[in-house]
Image (cartoon, coloured by chain):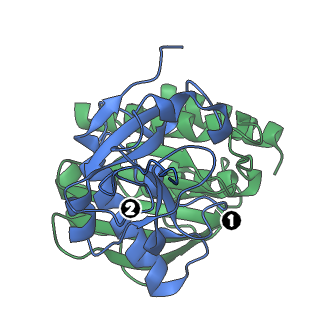
Chain colours: A blue, B green
Amino acid sequence: MASQEIQAPSSAPSDTDPVSSDEFILRRVLRRWYGPSKDPPVDRLAFRPTPRDVDGLSVFRANFLKPEKLDCDRATGNPGSYYVAQLRASDILALGLTIIPAPNDELPGHALIPELKTGLSGDAKNRAKEKQYRLAKLASNGIVYEPPSK
Amino acid sequence: MSKTETAVWHKIFIDDMQQPSPSLLTTSRDFILVRQWQEGLKALIQLTYLEPNWDGEGAEAPDAEIIDSCVTLFIKLYGQGMEAPTRVQPTPEGGVVVEWGSPNDYLEVEIDEPFRGEAMAVEGDAPAKHWPLEWKSTAGYPSQPRSEWSTGREFSSDEPTPTWTRAAIA
């Protein structure tokens, strides 16, 4: 009698699955980009792509990791230097943006907002800047993690 | 211009504003305006001390020429009676973003090369407005009288500085 392989339930979530509109999305916010007394508290620059964001702006799906993990993993840059903002995927989608799964080896739940990639110019760049500002406004109401005081 | 020269400009401008002429500061609003611009200028000058990789992700240090051109922009805007910026930030590519924020309105100038910027204004939920911005060096500063800062050189733009934003921030 042949042994049967034990298979994971087919309903187990995977970070390769499409992003659902009812998910929460996390974004790291460098300490410099957050000022509680400012308007808006989260700076537009927190959503501005860096030269490394060639395929889109990096975000993470809250279903797959805890916010504090984004400030602790040394592979992602500067531990102890990041706030983490949480946004509803539906709010991001309502801005005309998309969120595509982009799993990598560093952290689970990685995804990209391709409309906010680096290297845009002209009207596309202007549209992206406005979206970055709107995302910063949304993120200002959703800080879910603060880095340790320095 | 070198960081040292920038620091000298900073010292002259800050010191000058700390001992303003009584004839120029006739109201408490003027005094507050000067103080706010001092803070904005300090934030700008502090960017000159950022080292490469200031963000831990490989960012370039702010470009000294861009910062110097921002000093000129600040002088011009101050001379025009514009409110001081609420934020002055570096970009990972060595540029500077100067911002004026309020609960419902937002104005910024992103400067990626000396004396040239891209402005964006957002009013509530209305679509953002974008326009290029150019200004020229204020040669002769600080020997040039303060009253001539904003008139001695042209401050050009495809659109005028949005007065509605000033009103919203005031």
Q: Residue at x 47, y 72 (%)?
A: A114
Residue A132's label in the rendered image is 2
Q: From the image, state whether disc 2 or disc 1 is nearer to you.
A: 2
Q: Amino acid at mark 1?
A: Pro
Q: Residue at x 37, y 43 (%)?
A: B86
Q: Residue at x 44, y 28 (%)?
A: A68
Question: Helix or strand or loop: what does disc 1 sit on?
Answer: loop
Q: Do the residues indicated by labels 2 and 1 lie within the same chain of the protein? A: no
Q: Amino acid at mark 2?
A: Gln
Q: Which residue is under mark 1? A: B114
Where residue A149 appears, x then y in whole percent?
Answer: 48, 14
| Count of numbered badges drawn on the protein | 2
Disc 1 crowd rating (10 Å Cα; few below 14, some 14-19, many 20+) is some
Disc 2 crowd rating (10 Å Cα; few below 14, some 14-19, many 20+) is many
Question: Helix or strand or loop: what does disc 2 sit on?
Answer: helix
Q: Residue at x 55, y 33 (%)?
A: B42
